[in-house]
C-alpha cells in the first residue's frame, strides 16, 4: 500500500481552508460564550470519555507478532506462571482485526516489511504498537547485517519500547501498564 | 485442474514465519513449495568480522529453543582449533546441562504440536509450567533464562552451585511423573491417534537419500545418532542407547521424542552418580586467540532437532569462514515428499511432527 | 580429495556406489584468488566421512548439478548460487533465502560492499 507524500505547501493550504471554514460556521450560528451551557457539556463529555477510557484501558487484547527468540518469552508471558490474563490481556490472537495492541517481538528483515505494514493497516483504530526486545528497538545484535531494518520505528509509529535481550516477562508487564496509563489519559485518535 | 493457495507468512500456528504455496486437487495435496528467507540475517557473513568469543552471542540465537546446543558446538570447534582438552569434571557437567536442555526443548515441542492438532492451549500451559522449572535450574548455574553464554574452551564458566544436585533430582522426579501422564492422555485419545497414525509416511530409503536428520531419521528406522556413532563428552561411559521406531509416520516421530526424554532423565541420574571431583573452569576470555594449531576443523553435535555440522577455517583472531549446516534447513525440504497425497488438514500436523525452528532454517 | 570439475559427477557416483549414500553439506569458500566448493558425504553403516573439493576460477564459475546423484543437493545448490554467484548448469535454479533482494553482488564473497565499519585484511585485499 503506497502512501502519498504531502508537501509542506499543500499542508499549509489545507490548514488555512480549515480555519476559514470553522470561523464561517461560528459566525453563522451566532455562538456567544455561554458559561453554564459550556460547563455542562464539558462535564458530561469528560465523564463519558472517562468511562470509555477506563473500560478500554482495562481490556487490551494483543495480537502477537512473535517472529523470533522474543516469541519464546511472549509465550511464557501468556502461560501459567506469569499469567497475562489477570490484567486483561486476554485472547492472544493471530488476527489483527480483533486486537488493540501489536507486540512486535523479533528482528524484521527487508522481505518482511510489506507484511508488517499490512498487518498494521488491518488493525482498527485506536491502535498501539509495542516494540519488544532489542531487535525491534534498534536492530539489536544484527545491526550491521545486510538484510535487517534497524528498528521498527523506521516503518511504524511506536508507543512503548521494551529493552532487553530477551526482556523478562515481568518487563513486558510493566511496559503494558505504562501503555494502559497512556490509553486512559489520551484523546481519542 | 489444480488450484494454488497461499498459506502466508503470518498464520495462527506457532511455527514462525514460513510461506507455503500449496497446490491442491480438491482436498488432496499435489505439491507443496516452501518459500523461506523471512528471517535471514547473514550469520555466516557477520561471524567473519568478529573475534572468536564475540561470536558466541550470534551462535546462540540460531536455535532459540535450545541455545546451549549451538553454544557447545561452536566452543568445541574453537577448542579443536586451539588444541585444548576439556577437563574431566567439565565433560560430565556439559553432559548434564545439554540433556536438561534437550528435555526443555522437547517439552516445548509437545506443547506447540498439540496446539496445532486442536488441543487449544491445554497441554501448552502444562508443558510450559514444567519447562519453567528447568529454566529456573539453569538460571541458578548460568545467570540467565534463555541465552546462557556459559561455555568456555576447556570447561564451563563456573562450577555447579552446591545444591544443584538435590534440586535437579527433585525436578526430574516430578517431570517423569508428568511425562507418563501426558503419554497416557494422548495415546488414549481417539482424535490424536487418527490424526497421527499413517499420516506423513517417510520410507527408509527416501530418508537417507533426501538427507533427513534427528528424530525424523530415527523415526523411519535408521539407527544413526551422533551421540553413539561419534561419541563426545561422557556419553559412551554412561551407556547411551539411541531410540528408533520403524514405521516412519507422525506417530513414530512423536514416540521417538517421548522416549528420548525418558532416556535423558536416566542419563542425568547416572551422571550424578559418576561425576568426578576436580576443577571445571575453562579459560578466561582475554586469553582466547587461537594461533591456528589446526587450520581446518569439523565438528558434529546432536541438537534436539538433529545433527548440527560446523566447518570452520580458523585464522589468527577471527574465523576466516564459518559454515554451519542446521538440521531444520534440510528437514523442511522433505515436506514436498512427505505431504503428497494427504489432505490439507494434515499439513500442519506433519509440520508439527518435523519440529522446525524458523531461525534455524534461514541461516 | 581434490578433483577437477569435469570429473565431479563420476567421482560422486563412484563414492555412492561404495556406500557413501548420505550428503551432509555442500559448502563454498572464497579464497581470494579462487573459489572452492566442498562436498561432504558420509557412510552411515560404517561411520566414515569423505570430502571432495573442487577449485574454480572466480571469473569462470560453472558447475554441473549434482542432483541426479544425491537428491539432497537441491537446496544447498540454490544457496551456493545466491551467496557466491556460482552458476549451476543442468537445471533451473531459483534463489532461496534472498528472494526479493535487489542488492548488487553475492553476499558471501570477500569483495561484497556492505558498508560495515569493520574491514578485515582479506576484504581490503579483495577490494583493492
Image (cartoon, coloured by chain):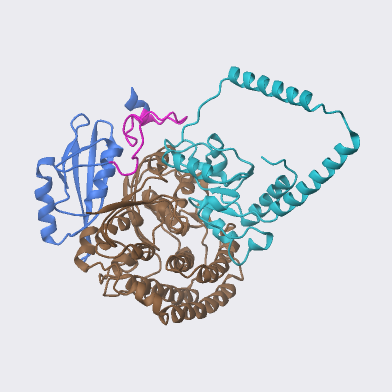
Is C118 covered by the magenta stretch?
yes
- Answer with the quarter of the image where residue B49 lies: top left
**The C terminus of chain A: image quadrant:** top right
- Chain in blue, by letter, is C
Is B360 covered by the magenta stretch?
no
Q: Position of residue B276 (x, y in %)?
A: 49, 71
- Answer with the quarter of the image where residue A110 lies: top left
- Residue occupying image coordinates x 37% and y 77%: B193
Q: Position of residue B293 (x, y in %)?
A: 35, 46
- Residue occupying image coordinates x 16% and y 45%: C65
Q: Position of residue B95 (x, y in %)?
A: 45, 66
Q: Position of residue B72 (x, y in %)?
A: 43, 57
Q: Colour of chain B?
A: brown
- Residue occupying image coordinates x 29% and y 38%: C82
Left or right: where does residue B72 sit relative to residue B340? Answer: right
- Chain in cyan, by letter, is A
Can residue C65 be seen?
A: yes
The magenta-colored residue range is: C95-123
What secondary structure do most residues of the magenta stretch adopt? loop
Amino acid at each position: 500500500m503506497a502512501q502519498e507524500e504531502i508537501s509542506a505547501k499543500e499542508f499549509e493550504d489545507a490548514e488555512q481552508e480549515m480555519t476559514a471554514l470553522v470561523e464561517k460556521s461560528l459566525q453563522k450560528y451566532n455562538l456567544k460564550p455561554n458559561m453554564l451551557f459550556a460547563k455542562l457539556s464539558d462535564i458530561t463529555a469528560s465523564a463519558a470519555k472517562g468511562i470509555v477510557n477506563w473500560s478500554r484501558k482495562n481490556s487490551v487484547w494483543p495480537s502477537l507478532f512473535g517472529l523470533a527468540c522474543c516469541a519464546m518469552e511472549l509465550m511464557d508471558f501468556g502461560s501459567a506462571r506469569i499469567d497475562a490474563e489477570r490484567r486483561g490481556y486476554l485472547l492472544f490472537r493471530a488476527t489483527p482485526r480483533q486486537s488493540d495492541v501489536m507486540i512486535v517481538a523479533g528482528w524484521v528483515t527487508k522481505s518482511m516489511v510489506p507484511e508488517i505494514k499490512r498487518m498494521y493497516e488491518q488493525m482498527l483504530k485506536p491502535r498501539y504498537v509495542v516494540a519488544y526486545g532489542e531487535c525491534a528497538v534498534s536492530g539489536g545484535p544484527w545491526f550491521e547485517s545486510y538484510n535487517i531494518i534497524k528498528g521498527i520505528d523506521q516503518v511504524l509509529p511506536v508507543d512503548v519500547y521494551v529493552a532487553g535481550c530477551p526482556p523478562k516477562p515481568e518487563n513486558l508487564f510493566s511496559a503494558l501498564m505504562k501503555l494502559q496509563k497512556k490509553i486512559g489519559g489520551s484523546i481519542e485518535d | 485442474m489444480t488450484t494454488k493457495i497461499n498459506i502466508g507468512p503470518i498464520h495462527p500456528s506457532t511455527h514462525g514465519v514460513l510461506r507455503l504455496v500449496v497446490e491442491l486437487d480438491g482436498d488432496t495435496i499435489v505439491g507443496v513449495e516452501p518459500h523461506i528467507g523471512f528471517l535471514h540475517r547473514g550469520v555466516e557473513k557477520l561471524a567473519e568480522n568478529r573475534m572468536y568469543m564475540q561470536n558466541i552471542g550470534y551462535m546462540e540465537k540460531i536455535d532459540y529453543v535450545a541455545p546451549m546446543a549451538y553454544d557447545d558446538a561452536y566452543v568445541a570447534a574453537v577448542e579443536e582449533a586451539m588444541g585444548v582438552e576439556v577437563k574431566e569434571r567439565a565433560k560430565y557437567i556439559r553432559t548434564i546441562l545439554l540433556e536438561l536442555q534437550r528435555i526443555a526443548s522437547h517439552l516445548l515441542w509437545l506443547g506447540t504440536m498439540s496446539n496445532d492438532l486442536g488441543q487449544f492451549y491445554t497441554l501448552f500451559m502444562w508443558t510450559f509450567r514444567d519447562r519453567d522449572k528447568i529454566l529456573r535450574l539453569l538460571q541458578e548455574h548460568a545467570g540467565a533464562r534463555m541465552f546462557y553464554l556459559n561455555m568456555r574452551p576447556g570447561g564451563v564458566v563456573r562450577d555447579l552451585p552446591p545444591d544443584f544436585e538435590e534440586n535437579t533430582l527433585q525436578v526430574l522426579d516430578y517431570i517423569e511423573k508428568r511425562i507418563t501422564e501426558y503419554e497416557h492422555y494422548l495415546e488414549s485419545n481417539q482424535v490424536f491417534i487418527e490424526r497421527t497414525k499413517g499420516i506423513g509416511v517417510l520410507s527408509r530409503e527416501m530418508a537417507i537419500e533426501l538427507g533427513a536428520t534427528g528424530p525424523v531419521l530415527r523415526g523411519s528406522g535408521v539407527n544413526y545418532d551422533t551421540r553413539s556413532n561419534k561419541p563426545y563428552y561422557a556419553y559412551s561411559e554412561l551407556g547411551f542407547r539411541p531410540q528408533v521406531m520403524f514405521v516412519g509416520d507422525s506417530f513414530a516421530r512423536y514416540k521417538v521424542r517421548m522416549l528420548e526424554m525418558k532416556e535423558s532423565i536416566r542419563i542425568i541420574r547416572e551422571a550424578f552418580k559418576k561425576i568426578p571431583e576436580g576443577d571445571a573452569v575453562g579459560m578466561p576470555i582475554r586469553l582466547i586467540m587461537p594461533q591456528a594449531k589446526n587450520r581446518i576443523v569439523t565438528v558434529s553435535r546432536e541438537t534436539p532437532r538433529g545433527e548440527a555440522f560446523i566447518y570452520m577455517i580458523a585464522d589468527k583472531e577471527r574465523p576466516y569462514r564459518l559454515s554451519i549446516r542446521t538440521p531444520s534447513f534440510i528437514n523442511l525440504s522433505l515436506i514436498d515428499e512427505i505431504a503428497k497425497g494427504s489432505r490439507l488438514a494434515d499439513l500442519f500436523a506433519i509440520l508439527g511432527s518435523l519440529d522446525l525452528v524458523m531461525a534455524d532454517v534461514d541461516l | 580429495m581434490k578433483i577437477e570439475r569435469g570429473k565431479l559427477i563420476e567421482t560422486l557416483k563412484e563414492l555412492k556406489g561404495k556406500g557413501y549414500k548420505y550428503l551432509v553439506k555442500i559448502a563454498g569458500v572464497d579464497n581470494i584468488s579462487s573459489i572452492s566448493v566442498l562436498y561432504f558425504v558420509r557412510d552411515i553403516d560404517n561411520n566414515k566421512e569423505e570430502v571432495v573439493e573442487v577449485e574454480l576460477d572466480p571469473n569462470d564459475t560453472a558447475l554441473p548439478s549434482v542432483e541426479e546423484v544425491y537428491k539432497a543437493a537441491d537446496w544447498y545448490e540454490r544457496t551456493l548460487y545466491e551467496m557466491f554467484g556460482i552458476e549451476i548448469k543442468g537445471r533451473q535454479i531459483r534463489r532461496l533465502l534472498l528472494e526479493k533482494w535487489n542488492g548488487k553482488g553475492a553476499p558471501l564473497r570477500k569483495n561484497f560492499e556492505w558498508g560495515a565499519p569493520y574491514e578485515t585484511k582479506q576484504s581490503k585485499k579483495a577490494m583493492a
